[in-house]
Image (tube, rainbow, N blue to C red):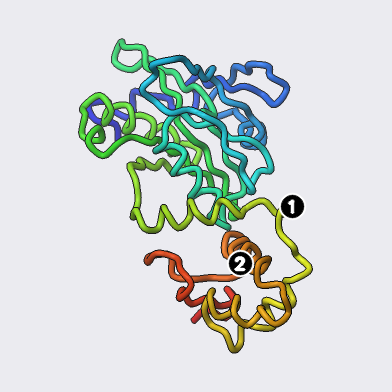
Amino acid sequence: MIVGVPTASVRFDSLPLTYCAATGERVETSLGRVALSELVAAGPVRQFRWYKGRTFYSGWYWSSTTGGMVAYESRLELARILLADFDPGVRGIVAQPFLLRGRIEGRDRSHVPDLLLSHADGGVTVVDVKPMHRLSDPKVVEVFDWTAAALAVRGWAFERWSGTDPVLLENVRFLAGYRRPNVIDHRLSEVVVGLLGDQATLGGIERAAEPAEVSGRVRPLLLHLLWTGALTTDLAVPLGAGSPIWRTETRG
């Protein structure tokens, strides 16, 4: 529920919504009418700016989920994008997906969420990223509550994100370096899978591959398979040679 705003006074489905179509055209519609398929293919609705002295760290991230670039405006946003890209249940990642506007209690409101995630089960999560210390800011609370109530009309979830376990994040960040399939020697996949039964750790599989003189190419493949979810390990502890790994489908 929106703090201080009676929900009965607001027709959230008619709120004006603007997005940037894949063609580059700006499209004006409403929250209730916008097609999810259009938003999933959309570009950032506002222009990203880079300039000397800017306090935020902006850039582009190549997503293995979408096969394209995703923009970010801070390292915290990049961290959330990394986790989304690593999540096998996420099918689409869009930065700055739309501009939502409305007039509430005589005041004009507008908000551009940071991310839109579409999921394999058909669900949608809209994410706003803010440092923990800002989540209690009354203005932030008001905007987030308004956004969450509006998105509920479409059955979309709203997530306030301010970080996660640092060990998990660093592990995912490291594995992201092996997300590109074109830099992996996939011909070794059968060799690696064949070693899994006896060699239960990353280092063990590498050592077992040494007689075949392919050990130097095994580690990148193992890390790529961990990224894709074909293999699993405990990401709550730092990755290392002693990290146990197993096939995802046999995890108990």
Q: Nearer the viewer, mark 1 or mark 2?
A: 2
Tell me: 31 left or right of 168: right
Q: What crowding class fits label 1: few (fewer than 14 Cα within 10 Å), some (14-19), or many (20 or more)?
A: few
Residue underneath mark 2: 219
Disc 1 residue type (three-letter) = Asn
CA separation in Å, label 1 and label 2: 15 Å
- Residue 72 in percent (x, y) is at 49, 31
Q: Residue at x 53, y 55 (%)?
A: 87
Looking at the rendered structure, which numbered label has been put on residue 192? none
**Depicted 173 relative to depicted 129: above or below:** below
Q: What crowding class fits label 2: few (fewer than 14 Cα within 10 Å), some (14-19), or many (20 or more)?
A: some
Q: Residue at x 70, y 82 (%)?
A: 211
- Residue 191 in percent (x, y) is at 72, 78
Disc 2 residue type (three-letter) = Arg
- Residue 46 in percent (x, y) is at 53, 18
Secondary structure state at the residue bearing disc 1: helix
Residue situated in front as seen by the camera: 124 or 66? 66
Residue underneath mark 1: 182
Q: Quadrant of residue 157?
A: top left
Residue situated in front as seen by the camera: 73 or 19? 73
Residue situated in front as seen by the camera: 196 or 251? 196
**Depicted 98 relative to depicted 166: above or below:** above
Tell me: 106 left or right of 37: left
Secondary structure state at the residue bearing disc 2: helix
